[in-house]
Image (tube, rainbow, N blue to C red):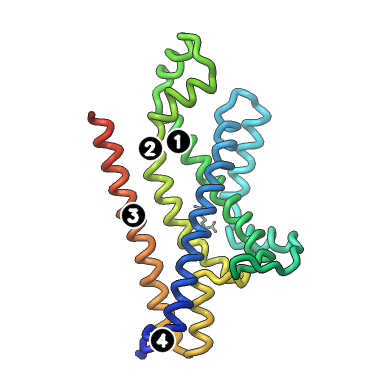
Amino acid sequence: MDFSFIFDWYYIETLLEGLVLTLVLALLAVVLGSLFGFLITLMRISNNKVLNFIGKVYVEIIRGTPLLVQVLLIYSFFKIPVTIIFGIDMSSFIPGMLALLINSSAYVSEIFRGGVLSVDKGQSEAALSLGMKDGLVMRKIILPQAIKNIIPSLGNEFITMIKETSIFMYLGVAELMYSAQIIKSETYRTKEVYIVVAVLYLVLTLSTSKLMTIIERKLRKHDEK
Ligand code: ARG
């Protein structure tokens, strides 16, 4: 085994750039996916049967098909001319990002729904009986309690997204896995490159886990007060 490439500044830079882009992609997917996912949750918990049904079908379709297929399908519909912004080619970044956030939104909407359902029904019934409006009940009564169950699962979703961004390699977006391909084709150190990349993914996911544990502990402490 020859790991000497990790001492070459050019390859270190390539890996770091990939690492940063991987993080940005995962973060964007979860943040935008959460915004969109929350709308799906609202549809799913509403009393309107049509909205309810659309939300359900959406989640089933997204969860029932592979992310890779979704990415390639959405990509094949988009014909954006090559536009480079911050060194990233938007013609593949935008459709890829769209697919990733759509995928995440379905999973996040279920996380939100689980969180909302975990709050006892009596809570919202009591608030409604006091004359609070639906939106207010959601904001002031349900969400503050649901958040405890939601945060850890959102952390898991972020970890999943960090790993799933590797799919962007197929679109030629220079995330971590794409960096690996570049280094591999230049150094022919296949095994070594994949080992280094695996370790880098682990560093990302383990640090996220650690961060989540700290946040959870803080939330629990706050609760005990
Ligand atoms: N790799 C799996 C798939 O292709 C998992 C996707 C998980 N997505 C998520 N947002 N948690 O379907």
Q: Image height check: is 146 above or below 73?
A: above
Location of residue 104 in the rendering, given as x and y in whole percent from the top left corner: 54, 50
Residue 126 location, x and y as percent? Answer: 42, 13
Mark 1 and mark 4 lie on one chain; the one further toward the N terminus is 4
Task: Quickly name the residue at label 3.
Answer: 209
The amino acid type found where label 1 is placed reads Gly
| Placement of the N terminus among the 4 image quadrants | bottom left
Q: Which of 54 and 181 is in front in this view?
A: 181
Residue 210, above or below 187: above
Q: Pick out the residue farthest to the top.
A: 130
Q: Earlier in the sequence, mark 2 or mark 1?
A: 1
Residue underneath mark 1: 114
Mark closer to the chain start, 4 or 2: 4
Q: Please state which amino acid type lies under the numbered disc 3.
A: Ser
Front residue of this view, candidates 202 and 62 = 202
Q: Badge 2: few (under 14), some or many (20 or more) residues near its Cα, within 10 Å?
A: some
Q: Mark 2 points at which residue?
A: 149
Density class for disc 4 (Cα within 10 Å; few <14, some 14-19, many ≥20) is few
Classify the position of the C terminus by image quarter: top left
| Displayed quadrant of residue 76 | bottom right
Marks 4 and 2, how far apart in space?
Answer: 44 Å
> Disc 2 and disc 3: Cα gap in Å?
16 Å
Lower position in the chain sequence, tag 3 or tag 1 = 1
Tell me the kind of residue under disc 2.
Asn
